[in-house]
Amino acid sequence: MNERLTLGGEFPPVSEEAWLSQVEKVLKGADFRKTLVTTTYDDLDINPLYSTLAQHPANPGSFPYTRAVSANGLSQQGWQVAQAYTHPDIAKGRKLLLEDLQKGVTRLRLRMSSASRRGETTLRAAQPAEAGLECYSVDDLDRLLEGVQLELVPTDVQAGAAYLEFALALQALWQKRGLANDQVEGGFNADPAAALAEFGTLPNDSEHMLARLATLAADTASQYPKVRAVGVDTAVYHNAGATHAQEIAIALATGVSYLRAMTATGMDINAACAQIRFFITTDTEYFQCISKLRSLRQLWAQVCQHSGADPEAAAIDLHATASMRMLSQRDPWVNMLRATIASNAAALGGAESIETACFDQALGQPSSLGRRISRNTQLLLLEESSMHRVVDPAGGSWFIEAHTQALSEKAWAIFQQLEKYGGIFEALTSGKVQGAIAAIREQRMAKIGARKQPLTGVSEFANLGEELPAVERVDTDAVFRDVSARNPGQDITATPVPTDLAPIKDLLSQQAPTHQISAALAGTATTCDALPDVRLGSEFEALRDASDRQLAASGKRPTVFVITPGKPAQFNARLGFTRNFFAAGGIDVEAAEPDLTPEQAAEAWKASGYTIAVLCSADPVYADSGSDFVQALRNAGADQVYVTGNALQDETDLQIHLGSNTLDVLRTLHTRLEVN
């Protein structure tokens, strides 16, 4: 039976022009583009309909690997379930990772302290907002990983500027445990560009930092077949506000810089490509994130090809990390949904490993529940939804394919511009990267402030009575005392040379602390403006925090008095809008009795003791008696009279409606209500 099934074959073909004519009837004069076309922060259009492809991408496993780096993708084994560890107390950190390994985590990401990642050369107590493992020696790592069979668990170290010190410390631990070089798997994640972007400083000039990277890569390639020395991590750029195309372009520029450093020392281009692992960030922009992973695979393959690498060496090792900018501190339970969307996008995009955000991560150290939900989100996607069983499930979607190509073209143009600046380090030290990201961040935050990009639980549907999850308060002073006792330091008489690893390995084997080695390796610092870490809801949450402080100090939140002329059927919809609007800034609403006369309403406002009165009803009510209410309030001494809606503009001090810049209005109210 050779008959071919044609879906929709019984229906006559429809042209795009015919479809548009029907759409215009439905729109009834509304602008097609404003109504149905979405423009991303990369200035790319997302259209309502896609009906064809100019060219289909190559099959999975075929260059340039848009769909997958192998014919089977991850369909056989699935992706690795990764989790990051940042608890400063070693004993608590060990307990957390052992629990995670027993319950589904298959890859460890050890994120060192902020001091280590900055390349600081002395021990200090961590600040409350800082997070990271307080490990400074091989013995510290051994204590942290006690009970972990390192030959079975891929382990990544994220040490920022101190990548060489901690890479060699992990090597020393493997040797201490008697593990063969071909038994261990993981990554050292040497990424000095990301460290510079995050902290605004490197302990040496970029040439020296790249020389360290190249030396480490050559050493790793010669000894550890399952370990990659170099990491390209875009999280710092993403969390500062970068677009998806900017992330891809920065990843490419960073990868090219590292390739040049490795090949300049004589390393084969294929071997150099095999030393790089990419970490890309996914968030709630679901389809764009799927396209981002596919685009990066495609573009990196082209970079490797242009660099002279074989097609096999051009297959990217691509991993997904959790977005921090999407997480909220308020109504953090919504973060479970955000994390699920981001993880799902990473899975459909074909990430080799995925790190899912804990729902309470923005509040501090994740709780046991937060970690469990994070693990189980991925396990559900793997074991119950079988998301990995289909290779590139998004492939063939006209929209995804078209958006992947548009994103690739945009990212390639930005990458070429970064190269014209002189590469990623020059683009950072000149401020070009920071300026480009800041421009997008301002656009994004302006839309959030105006609630054109709503955040559930933050700018929309804020719950003033919510109880936030308990957060562990780490005694950083006690941790510092313990760290200092464990790492008294040594006299390092000979200055180690970063291109000669043997003396450094010897020092680490003798329990020399990593910060002392960092001090011995330090030279002329490289500096730039550090990228800020900006969560999308942070500006609204700052107002909520101020409201909480006033509640704690006085027993009362900042409050406005709302007057509701007319019947409930006339004002209820706008009253709900008004409560929602003010709650986003932590401002409570006290509503008067309904159906009062203007004089009664004015008396009720005066008796309330509140300084701001808000009229809230339907437009016909405003037209009939709105002016009378305003005049009665003025006569009673009301200096500030607001109205919900666009009515009474000449008579009221502020109109609150869908077009209002919510954040600006709420900030003004905090000032007028004298909220500290």
Image (spheres, rainbow, N blue to C red):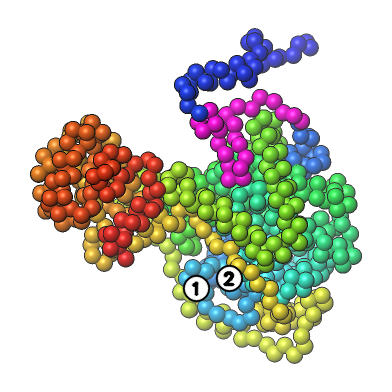
Residue 172: x and y, percent?
74, 73
- Is residue 273 a member of the stretch shown in magenta? no
Disc 1 to disc 2: CB gap under 8 Å: yes
Q: Nearer the viewer, residue 376 or 302?
A: 302
Residue bearing mark 2: 114
- What residue is drawn where x is 64% and y is 80%? 121
Disc ID at residue 207: none
SS label for mark 1? loop
Query: Where is the C terminus found, in terms of image quarters?
Result: bottom left
Binning the other alpha carbons within 10 Å of mark 2 as few (below 14), some (14 to 19) or many (20 upward) gives many
**Span colored in magenta:** 32-55
Query: Where is the N terminus found, in terms of image quarters?
Result: top right
Taking the image as shown, residue 82 lies to the left or right of residue 257, namely left
Residue 43: x and y, percent?
61, 42
Q: In this rendering, is residue 13 above or below 27?
A: above
- What residue is drawn where x is 70% and y is 69%? 163
Taking the image as shown, residue 570 lies to the left or right of residue 369, namely left
- What residue is drawn where x is 62% and y is 77%? 120
Q: Amino acid at mark 2?
A: Ser
Q: Is residue 105 visible?
A: no
Disc ID at residue 127: 1
**Numbered marks: total:** 2
Q: Amino acid at mark 1?
A: Gln
